[in-house]
Image (cartoon, helix red, strand yellow):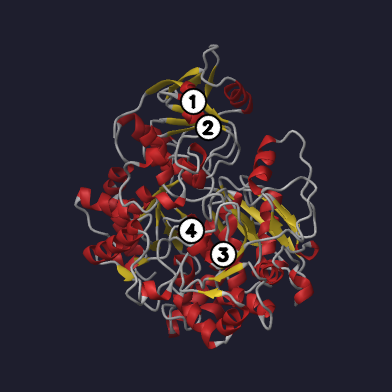
Amino acid sequence: MPAQTMFEKVWAAHEVVAETPDTPAILYIDLHLIHEVTSPQAFALLQAHGLPVRRPDRTLATMDHSTPTRTEQIFGDVPIKVDAAAKQVRQLEQNAANFGVELFGLRDPRRGIVHVISPELGTTQPGMTIVCGDSHTSTHGAFGALAFGIGSTEVGHVFATQCLLQRKPKTFAVNVAGRLKPGVTAKDLILAIIGKIGVSGGTGYVFEYRGEAIRALSMDERMTVCNMSIEAGARAGMIAPDDTTFRYLADRPRAPRGKDWDAAVARWRALASDPGARFDAAVDIDAGSLEPMITYGTNPGMVLPISAAIPFRAADAVNAKALEYMGFHEGDAMLGKPIDVVFIGSCTNGRLEDLQAAAQILKGRKVASGVRLMIVPGSQQIKRDAEAAGLAEIFIAAGADWRESGCSMCLGMNGDTVGAGQYAVSTSNRNFEGRQGVGARTLLASPYTAAASAVHGKISDPRKML
Amino acid sequence: MEPIKQLRSTTVVMPSTNIDTDQIIPARFLTITTKLGLGKSLFADWRYLPGGEPNPRFILNQAAAAGSRILVTGHNFGCGSSREHAPWALLDYGFRAVISSGIADIFCSNSLKNGLLPIVVDAATHRWLLENPGAEVLVDLETTRLTLPNGISVNFPIEAFARHCLLSGVDELGYLQSRLADIERYESRHAAA
């Protein structure tokens, strides 16, 4: 058998019917994650056809996008501010009950951002196919799963058949040599990768992140990298499972146990790309050469090392429009630019290690006056862990707003927004116009950079504070 | 779904590259639980001024755009979120096709499932379309050809099965259901997994 990439192995193992020139492959889906925003229309499709959810045992629901983050709105009597959001939450409760789907509802201790809770529970496992009506499903690729976002019609297809019609994508090796320097994080690495490949360079591909720097990353860090694959246009990004992966998964509530665990690990070890496996495209990055990164424009590919100045791009109308939106000029230094809001959270950087990084900077320091720092854990479990570890205390003492878990200010659906014209250093994944609120100006960065900037009230290099 | 064979329309041109789905339909409009009524919120933050009145500088608010069913855009249209609300909003507004030099994967797949034609053309054709807003073009799904008013005609790629479904007005779910026996066989083979 010819040498295969990890992607090809996972794909082949899930082909119910192979593709032909006339028809796409029928791909079996092991795990279907759903949330309140992209599932209502899919449940309606089932109702219209009189169909059940075919495999509720392979389906897991939570609510994260439109849910409030204020404690009193979840556990108290204060109603959800946005009526339509409250309706969406009720609709998911009803649909889950009607179709027999397991739901981690608003007050469930296992609730959280869908891409945070599934790894946390151990439902995300190497070699699986995982889909969700959410483009950041690529996060789960950190475990060597083939995981990608789908639309609501496809959510309906998976409900009804546990399968999807898919054309086989091409493969793209992202080779990351060397080691990240202190103060330079997985977030800086993926921003640098997107800067190099461009926001459409990965269209049609599945990434495989490889090399020494990737092997050295923890699972939280690998999830940050895979999470943003879609920002380079790739629907999925994968990392071969190894001992780091197995240590993370061992004893998770829904990971295999005993003999099943041993058999699973043996299977998972065989998933890595074979030596000599061929990729359709490749890019090389030297991790050791990277600085903390920050975006300056209106897509994640408009990114710079934090000590750099905004480049001159004569006769580039799109660049000019982005700078006008941001209120920046060519030649401006990024360091020292004043900011209004800092958001630490999201499926990109809302995990425990991200909060630990923020706490490292914030310990014994205060948020600059006039700056609002909001810290939103990725899940209720992470909230409890952060509180037990004393991180929440550090955040509150620094003057941060410490919230319940959810997507929150990453996309502002729940009313947690950045004001028009305000600058927000955000650990989230998208700096699109208006993403965090109408007229909001987003600067994507790592939890270190976000926390450092909150303390100084301006864009700051965290390395001096570590 | 209505079968689609041909589409003849003038174009509206939005030359920006990387128009993401947050621009097409901002997240605050995603709290609906149906697919209907999103057309009025299409490109909301570009289309309306802060007070809610139409922004006269935005192309869709100009007389030339009225009645157009084909949107021509810069490279990498529809990048970002997987929200199917993006094609729903474009369709509800009245568009039936998007033409660009590159269209994001998930948006492309979502569009095909709803009868919005995602048409990727070569750089020269793309440049011509960007430089000639309002041109009347013909999209022929049967022959997979796009014909410009100057008579030039080019082929466009489109996934074969999606094309078949669009031409016959059937959805893809029916096909998946017709293969349930294969799916059950797969499941019994992989029962342990």
Q: Which residue is mark 4?
A: A412
Please state which amino acid type lies under the numbered disc 4: Gly
Q: Which mark is residue A348?
A: 3
Q: Which residue is mark 2?
A: B58
Q: Secondary structure at mark 4?
A: loop
Please state which amino acid type lies under the numbered disc 3: Thr
Q: Secondary structure at mark 1?
A: loop
**Other-residue count near label 2 (Cα within 10 Å), few / some / many at <14 / 14–19 / ≥20:** some
Residue A117 horizontal side relative to residue A332, left or right = left
Residue A188 horizontal side relative to residue A59, left or right = right
Q: Pinpoint the chain carrying mark 4.
A: A
Q: Nearer the viewer, mark 3 or mark 1?
A: 1
Q: Which residue is mark 1?
A: B62
- Which quadrant would the C terminus of chain A be assigned to in this image? bottom right
Q: Pinpoint the chain carrying mark 1.
A: B
Determine the CA span between mark 3 and mark 2. 33 Å
**Other-residue count near label 3 (Cα within 10 Å), few / some / many at <14 / 14–19 / ≥20:** many
Q: Is residue B146 above or below residue A463?
A: above
Q: Nearer the viewer, mark 3 or mark 4?
A: 4
Q: Is residue B56 above or below residue A350?
A: above
